[in-house]
C-alpha cells in the first residue's frame, strides 16, 4: 500500500501534538511541554520517540494508565537523593521535574540521584541529561526499557551544545541500565515478578565544580571532541538543522492516524 512521506514544519507538528493532548484533557501548559519534548525527538532524528508516541499515549489515557491532569511531586529522601512521584502523569513532566530537582541537589551536595516512580514513558533520555549538562553538570540516565536504556551528557566549551550520547548501549551496559532503572524506580524488569512497566527511570548528576574548575573541564573536553571525526550528538545536531529548515518527515499513515486523534479528527 502506498504510504507517502510528508514534510511538516516543526511548528505545525507541535500544534498538532498540543491539540491531541488537549483533546484528552491535558492542561495547556503541560500539553506544550509534552508536545515540545516529542517534537524535539523528531527534529533530532529519533522518530520512534517523537509525536508518533501519541498513538500509544492516547489509549493509555483512556485506559487510566496516564492521568493527563496529574502533576509530579518530589520527595527528598536523604541529602542528594530525591524520589519524583509521577502520579501517573505524562513521563516527560516527571522527568522534567526530576531535572529541576536534581540540578539544585547536585550543586548543593556535589552529586545527586533522582528516581522516578509511578511514572510513564519519558521519551528520549538524552533530553534530560542534556538539560543537566547545559547547567554545567555531568549527567547519566538509566531506564528499564530495550529502546533507550542509557544516556549520558557533559558540557563542552561555551556556546557549544552539550556532548550527548543517547540511545542503545553495549550489552553489559544495557544490563546495568535495566537493573538500575528498573529496580531503583520500583518498576521492575520485563519478564520478572514485580514488573510494572518499562518506564523506570533514574537520573544521576555530578557537579564538575566539586572536583575541577568547570572552565578547565570544558576546555579539555572540547579539545578531545575536536580530535574525533564526529563527537556524540553531532550527527543528531546536523539532522536537527536540516529538519528545522526543511520540515520533519512523517508517513502519510502516521499523519492520518494522528489527525484522527485531534479535536478536528
Image (cartoon, rainbow, N blue to C red):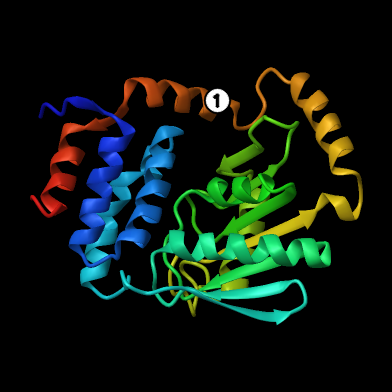
In the displayed structure, would residue 97 be above or below residue 153? below
Left or right: residue 205 compared with residue 99: right
Q: Is residue 102 visible?
A: yes
**Where residue 68 sits in the image (x, y, percent)?**
31, 69
Residue 108 placement, left or right of 243 = right
Write the residue at 64% across / 31% down. 232
Name the residue furthest right. Answer: 212
Report the residue at 27% width, 57% height from top: 56
Q: Is residue 228 left or right of residue 164?
A: right
Residue displayed at 49% across by 80% down: 194
Frontmost residue, 44 versus 196: 44
Is residue 144 placed above or below 258 in the rendered structure? below
Which residue corresponds to mark 1? 235
Does residue 149 appear to the left or right of 152 in the view shown?
Answer: left
**Splitting the image into 4 quarters, where does residue 157 fall?**
top right
Q: Quadrant of residue 20?
A: bottom left
Amino acid at each position: 500500500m502506498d504510504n507517502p512521506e510528508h514534510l511538516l514544519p516543526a511548528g505545525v507538528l507541535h500544534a498538532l501534538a498540543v491539540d491531541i493532548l488537549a483533546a484528552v484533557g491535558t492542561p495547556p501548559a503541560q500539553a506544550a511541554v509534552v508536545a515540545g519534548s516529542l517534537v524535539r525527538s523528531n527534529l533530532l532524528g529519533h522518530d520512534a520517540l517523537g509525536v508518533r508516541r501519541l498513538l500509544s499515549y492516547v489509549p493509555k489515557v483512556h485506559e487510566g494508565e496516564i492521568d493527563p491532569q496529574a502533576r509530579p511531586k518530589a520527595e527528598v529522601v536523604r541529602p542528594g537523593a530525591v524520589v519524583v512521584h509521577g502520579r501517573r502523569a505524562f513521563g516527560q513532566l516527571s522527568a522534567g521535574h526530576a531535572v529541576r530537582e536534581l540540578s539544585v541537589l547536585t550543586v548543593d551536595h556535589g552529586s545527586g540521584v533522582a528516581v522516578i516512580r509511578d511514572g510513564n514513558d519519558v521519551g528520549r533520555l538524552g533530553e534530560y541529561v542534556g538539560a543537566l549538562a547545559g547547567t554545567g553538570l555531568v549527567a547519566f540516565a538509566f531506564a528499564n526499557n530495550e529502546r533507550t536504556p542509557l544516556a549520558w551528557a557533559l558540557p563542552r566549551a561555551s556556546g557549544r551544545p552539550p556532548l550527548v550520547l543517547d540511545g542503545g548501549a553495549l550489552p553489559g551496559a544495557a544490563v546495568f541500565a535495566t537493573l538500575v532503572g528498573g529496580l531503583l524506580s520500583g518498576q521492575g524488569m520485563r519478564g520478572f515478578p514485580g514488573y510494572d512497566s518499562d518506564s523506570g527511570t533514574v537520573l544521576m548528576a555530578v557537579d564538575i565544580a566539586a572536583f575541577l574548575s568547570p572552565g578547565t573541564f570544558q576546555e579539555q573536553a572540547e579539545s578531545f571532541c575536536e580530535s574525533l571525526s564526529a563527537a556524540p550528538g553531532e550527527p543528531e545536531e546536523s539532522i536537527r538543522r536540516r529538519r528545522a529548515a526543511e520540515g520533519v518527515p512523517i508517513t502519510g499513515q502516521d499523519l492520518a492516524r494522528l489527525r484522527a486523534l485531534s479535536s478536528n479528527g
